[in-house]
Every structure is written in structure tokens, then in C-alpha cells.
Image (cartoon, rainbow, N blue to C red):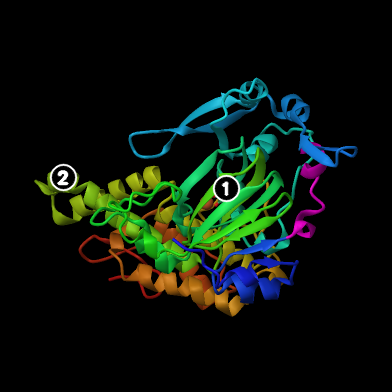
Amino acid sequence: MSENINYLNVLRRNVLSYDEFYADYLLPNVPVIFNRSLVSSWPAFDLWVKSCKDSNSSHIHWDYFQDTYGALEVTVADCANVDSFGNQDRRTMLLREVISMWKDAEGQSLYIKDWHLAKQLEKTGSPSVPFYSTPDFFRDDWMNSYYTSHTDDDFRFVYMGAKGTFTPLHRDVYTSYSWSTNVYGRKRWWFFPPEQTPYLFMKYRNVNLYDVRNVDLKDFPDFHRATPIIIEQEAGETIFVPSGWYHQVENLTHCISINHNWCNSVNLRSLYTSMCAEVIQVEAALEDVREILSKGQSDDEWKLEWTRIVQDVVNRDAGWNWLTFWKMVSHALHAVVSPGSSSPQGVSSRHNVFPPAPANLRPPTAFILEQIRACYDDFMTRDRRECEGEVQEVVSTIGSLLVNPGYQPLKGFAMTRCENGDTKSSCPGSHQ
Ligand SMILES: O=C(O)CCC(=O)C(=O)O
Ligand SMILES: [Fe+2]
């Protein structure tokens, strides 16, 4: 493994315009690090970190964490223990329990991950100060815009761990992007461009490498061909993690970071493809269920039930399915073609903490529509049973909006029926 020098000269950049970020990093899908000026207005730096002027050093403001967030639940990964699926063991603890262990120099392998702090504070209506805001480059974020306004979940996280804790090699969920800002401490990152993904997998097995610092070349014989970008991220710096790049992260000191997983029109096709792959995987795993279902029922009955079961399992396994994907797209598309109007049909709205990005902080409208249309057109070629019920309602609206951006769906959109009794999509270009 040798370091990839091709990207290094463009990696650290001062704050740019959105158009430069879009052209130089989002579209080519390559990483970049921004300096502290991107996030200089964040209260977290003052609230969470105490500077000692005399020694010109700083440390984590533990008392603030204890007093303000101590009673909150956090998910803690134990970096020293791997479960039977090859993931770090996870458990739920109160923040104050973890901090008191750290104060006693215990629990050095514990790493607080995926802590939904912003969501927790919003839920409890906490009067505490908002600790950060999303940098402009990352506001065109369809995942958080949809999830925060329509579900109880989100992809906005805080990470906190002692020196030596780490996140094993992975690709972000659904090939989403991430961005990650170090509020305190230093991290080392390894980045592998997507074309090097095959070097990170076992020969003949669909298992990726766990720790790039400890590789058995008998199991991963092509790993020596990999040329990762290795960088050290300082406090205050923000990293953009492109879509589909495998990466590993190690905390070189005690660290606190804030990160989001996110997506938009630029990586939408990649998310769509990852959903198709997830469906294939679940179908293969449920082959015996398929056999049982197919016995004694008409083709149409069992196939519809089978599709529903697969979508249900995809949802439980990956955290979303076609319905969520298309609702998210619908939410974003609505904001592009008819900003200011109410949410699309089939989607209930609630308090909007993450509004869709304004036009100057997103790609050109024609590009956005083109990306959605590509996914839509492909979806229309898939088994029509995936587009039934609520999915059909949402996808129909998307189809209509793509053709006629001023389209206003009627309440209770009617499904048409084929002569043989099948439900049939009434979206333009439906799969028939
Ligand atoms: O900071 C970490 O440990 C992991 C962060 C990460 O994987 C990400 O932001 O995508
Ligand atoms: Fe990641």
C-alpha cells in the first residue's frame, strides 16, 4: 500500500464558492478539506472546548458535557471487541456514565458514535444553545431535509472517543456522502477511490477488509495494489467524504466531531443503484420464503406478497426501502419545482428544522430533474409490483412533476386497474 499522491494537492482548500465546490468536488466525487473558517461561527468551539491561554493548549470542557447532556443516551462502540458479524460491539449508555469512566482513565476503547444530539435536543425542546449549523456547501441534503421533517430519525451525528478509538473500513450508508468537522482533537483518515474497491475485498467472498493497519495479504492478496489518500485532520477542519469511497478513521487524540450523512441529485443515481443491489441481496437471502409462498397460490397473489416481504426486510436491514427513497425524492423535487408550496401528497409534514437548500446552493434545476428522471425511468422498467400502493402514489406525483413542474396532485390519487385485476401504475411511462 502506497499513498495516492494524485489527489493530495487539491485536498486542502480555503472556503470556495458553492459553484466551485460543485464543479471541483461534488461532480468529480473527490474529497476535500476545508479550514476552520468554514465553521468559525459554531458555538460548539466555545461551549465544548476550554482554552488555557497560559500553556497555549486546550482541553474538552467535560463539565459542560456532564451538566448539559449527561442524562442523554448515547450509542457506544467498543473498539476492542468485534461481534459475530464483524462489527464493533455496540451498547447504549448515559453520557455521564461514559464520561465518568474516561475521567477515571477507564473505557479507553469506547467510542460514542452516531449520537443524534441535535435530534435529542429538538425532541426535549431543550433551551440549550444550538451548537452548530450546517455549512452552506452541505445544505443541499435530501436525507436530512426529508428525515427531520417526516420521520423520527435523522443522519446528524456527534462522535466522541479517546485516543486510539477508530471506525473500521467502510463505505457510508447507501453510498451517501458525509462531511465531518473536528471540534476537538486530530484524526487520521484513509480514503480509497471507488475504482480501488476490489482490492479491499476477500478473494471469492463478499467480505471487505476491517482494519487497513492490519491486513493479512493471504486473505486480501490485492491489497498491496491500493493507493489510499492518507491525511491528518486537525481541530477545526472539515472533510467532505465523497460517495462510494471506502474510508477508515482513527482518533489520534481524544476527539469530538460533528458529521452528517447526506445525499442530493449528484449522488442520487448511486443511491438508487445501491437500493437495487440491496433488493437483490435480500431476495437471495429469502429464497426459501419465496419457494413456500409460490406453492398453492396464484402467481399474482404470491408475487405481490413476496415483493412486500422483500421491501419490509430491506427496510429493516438497510433502514429504508423504495417507499422512503421515493418520498425523499418527492420532498426534494417539490422544493425545486414549486418552492413554498405544501408537502406532496402521501407525505405528512412537521416542524422543518432542515429546510431544502435555496437555488444558489444546489445544482442547476435541469441537472436535478435529469438525475431524478434517470432513476424514475429505470424504476419503471422494474417489476411493477414494487410500484404499488403508497409507492405508486408517490412515484406518480414525481412522474407528473417531471413532465409538468406546475402539477398539483389530487387528494386520494386513484389507481387504475388492468383488465386482469392487477394494480397498474398510472404514472407516465409506467411498467406494463
Ligand atoms: O470519525 C469517525 O470515526 C468516522 C466518520 C466517518 O466515517 C464519516 O464521517 O463518514
Ligand atoms: Fe464514514
Judging depth in this view, the residue of 231 and 243 nearest the camera is 231
Tell me the SS state at disc 1: loop
Residue 73 vertical placement versus 325 (above, below): above
The CA span between labels 2 and 1 is 34 Å
Q: Position of residue 99 (x, y in %)?
A: 66, 25
Amino acid type at circle 2 is Asp
In the rendered image, which quarter contains the N terminus?
A: bottom left
Q: Main secondary structure of the magenta part?
A: helix
Highlighted range, magenta: 35-48
Quickly name the residue at label 1. 155
Residue 76 vertical placement versus 105 (above, below): below
Judging depth in this view, the residue of 270 and 342 nearest the camera is 270
Sooner in the amino-acid sequence: mark 2 or mark 1:
1
Q: Position of residue 393 (x, y in %)?
A: 44, 59
Lateral position of residue 418 relative to residue 38, left or right: left
Label for residue 348?
A: none
Q: Residue furthest left?
A: 296
Lateral position of residue 352 relative to residue 328, left or right: right
Label for residue 288?
A: 2
Residue 123 vertical placement versus 43 (above, below): above
The yes-or-no answer for disc 1 within 8 Å of ligand 1 is no
The yes-or-no answer for disc 2 within 8 Å of ligand 2 is no
**Crowd rating for badge 1 (residues with CA inside 10 Å; few <14, some 14–19, many 20+):** some
